[in-house]
Amino acid sequence: MAEATTILSPSAYLEWEAAQEERHEYENGKLIIMGGSSRAHNKITSNLHGLIWLFLRETEGTMNIYQADMRVHSPLSDKYFYPDLVLTKREEHYLENAPDTLLNPLLLIEVLSESTAVRDRGSKFEAYRSIGSLREYVLVAQDQSQIEGFFRNDAGEWIIREPVAGQDNAFSFITLDLELKLGEVYQGVGV
């Protein structure tokens, strides 16, 4: 992931991004080029998507999961991101002039890499917290079997959960009645 020096307005970004083959996030007027993902990143994301999708089949269409290409808008300074996984509940709302930009995610998952970890924990998480519908944010390491989570309680406060580590342990979501064994999340990754 590399940051470009191009400065655009939010509307100019959305128009420009629609014509691009590569994805670019947008933060503080700057374009952030989304680099290619490692094999481990792709495998973890695919495993998570598959495991959650299997669970969601039982929700009879009340929830959806999207992988990598669903853009999310943060009202904090008009920021736009492509989380690794996005989960929605019930009716989805999209930006008026950008029907591929989701406004109301319930759960966001990022698979950490060396080049994205600081941003995923810092400025990105700050922007995500400004999304009123967001209830849970999950960070998944790719260099070790560890998942950490954050959730918004009924008072609107963000709570940090203890990380879960080790292939034999399980991570439980707050927004879903789902427990994932880390051995399944990291299957085929070799960590």
Image: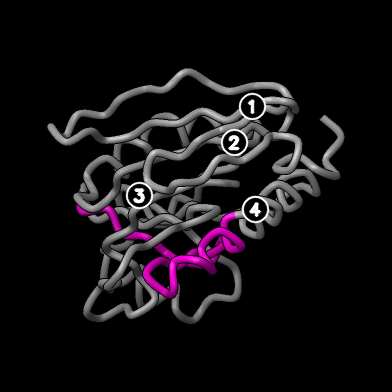
| Secondary structure category for the residue under label 2 | strand
Q: Are marks 1 and 2 in contact (CB under 8 Å)?
A: yes
Which amino acid does the dot numbered 1 rest on? Answer: Gln
Which of the two labelled residues, at mark 4 and mark 1, occupies the earlier sequence position? 4
Tag on residue 35? Answer: 4
Which of the two labelled residues, at mark 4 and mark 3, occupies the earlier sequence position? 3
Tag on residue 146? Answer: 1
- Verify whether residue 101 appears in magenta: no
Which amino acid does the dot numbered 4 rest on? Answer: Gly
Estimate the spatial distance between the alpha carbons at disc 4 and disc 3, rounded to whole Å: 16 Å
Which amino acid does the dot numbered 2 rest on? Answer: Val
Q: Tell me: 167 left or right of 87.
A: right
Estimate the spatial distance between the alpha carbons at disc 4 and disc 1, rounded to whole Å: 23 Å
Quadrant occupied by the C terminus: top right
- The residue sitting at the left extreme is 155
- The residue at the point 56 percent across, 33 percent down is 171
Q: Which residue is mark 2?
A: 140
Estimate the spatial distance between the alpha carbons at disc 4 and disc 2, rounded to whole Å: 18 Å
What is the crowding at mark 2: few (fewer than 14 residues within 10 Å), some, or many (at least 20)?
Answer: many
Which of the two labelled residues, at mark 4 and mark 2, occupies the earlier sequence position? 4
| Secondary structure category for the residue under label 3 | strand
Which of the two labelled residues, at mark 2 and mark 3, occupies the earlier sequence position? 3
Locate residue 70, reporting x and y percent. Answer: 46, 66
Q: Hey, which quadrant is residue 116 in on the image? A: top right
> Magenta region: which residues?
52-75
